Image (cartoon, rainbow, N blue to C red):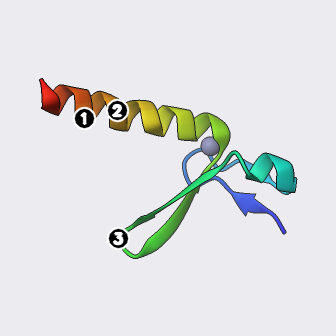
Amino acid sequence: MSHTCDHCGRTESDAAALLTWTTSVERDRQLRYCAACSREHLRALEGKLDHEWW
Ligand SMILES: [Zn+2]
């Protein structure tokens, strides 16, 4: 079973590697992000949060 990153389109079929992927549900769709995109995603979320906190 392989998954496709919804951000960069990369596919991964290695179960261990897939553990580093994150999933999020947005507008009733389940999206998957690979490890690299997860980091980008989290940094963006944290950056936004920081911005709002300040
Ligand atoms: Zn990706």
Q: Earlier in the sequence, mark 2 or mark 3?
A: 3
Q: Which residue was labeled with disc 2?
A: 46
Q: Which quadrant holds residue 34?
A: top right
Disc 3 marks a residue whose amino acid type is Arg
Front-most of 13 and 54? 54
Image quadrant holding the C terminus, namely: top left
The residue lying at 69 percent from left, 58 percent from top is 4
User: Is 32 left or right of 40, judged from the image as shown?
Assistant: right
Disc 1 marks a residue whose amino acid type is Leu
Q: Which residue was labeled with disc 1?
A: 49
Q: Which residue was labeled with disc 3?
A: 27
Report, in whole angstroms, how far the alpha carbon at label 3 lies from the one at label 1. Answer: 20 Å
Instruction: Assess whether mark 1 and mark 2 are in contact (beta carbons under 8 angstroms).
Output: yes
Disc 2 marks a residue whose amino acid type is Glu
Q: Which quadrant holds residue 25?
A: bottom left
- Picture layout, residue 28 above or below residue 22: below
From the top left corner, tell me how far across and down residue 35 is, in percent: 65, 39
- Mark 3 nearby-residue class (10 Å; few <14, some 14–19, many ≥20): few
From the top left corner, tell me how far across and down residue 39 is, in percent: 54, 33
Q: Earlier in the sequence, mark 3 or mark 1?
A: 3
The residue lying at 73 percent from left, 51 percent from top is 19
- Mark 2 nearby-residue class (10 Å; few <14, some 14–19, many ≥20): few
Report, in whole angstroms, how far the alpha carbon at label 2 lies from the one at label 1. Answer: 5 Å
Q: Residue furthest bottom?
A: 28
